[in-house]
Amino acid sequence: MKERHSTARILPIALTAIALSMHMVAAGENEKPEWKGAIETPGRITETRMVALAEIPLDQAIHTALKKVAGKPIKAELESEDGYLIYGVEIVTPEEKVVEVILDPSSGRILNIEDERAEHRDALDRENDARRKA
């Protein structure tokens, strides 16, 4: 009888924690970026189509990103993000921060610079807060 009572107390708490974490994930997914690219990508798009649409090559995007953020590039890709085609170049700075430079593949213009560690820290903080509340 005692086991059933403790399960009855834990279950609502666990369900609340799951609901909160799902809400937080959904809220993060619905955040719109502050930038807009020039090449829209409604729906799914193939890699070959993305390459055909990009007007500047990947090496030029990396070069432009390194002019703005000093460091060593560790990842660079052409991708569709938030409905726009972008180049994302991740750079490790001399301070050992990971920064992503978002560039427009039609012009090479820098659209945004994001601190990748801060994004990961924020996600971990949200998870830990949900666990503490549970």
Image: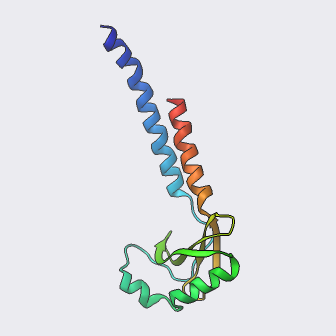
Q: Is residue 103 left or right of residue 7?
A: right
Placement of 8 over or under 73, stated as above or below: above
Q: Residue at x 62, y 56 (%)?
A: 118
x 60%, y 89%: residue = 107
Q: Position of residue 84 (x, y in %)?
A: 51, 76
The residue positioned farthest toward the top in the image shown: 1
Q: Residue at x 53, y 79 (%)?
A: 87
Q: Estimate the x, y position of residue 32 in percent, counting from the top left.
A: 57, 63
> In the rendered image of this protein, does residue 82 appear above or below residue 49?
above
Instruction: Kindly identify the residue that appears in the image at 54 percent across and 31 percent down.
Output: 132
The relative height of residue 3 versus residue 55 in the rendered view (above or below) is above
| Quarter of the N terminus within the rendering | top left
Side of 22 relative to 34 (left or right): left
Compared with 36, 117 (above or below) is above
Q: Position of residue 46 (x, y in %)?
A: 35, 80
Q: Residue 65 location, x and y as percent?
A: 63, 80
Report the side of 51 relative to 119 (left or right). left
Count of numbered circles on the image: 0
Q: How is the image coloured?
A: rainbow
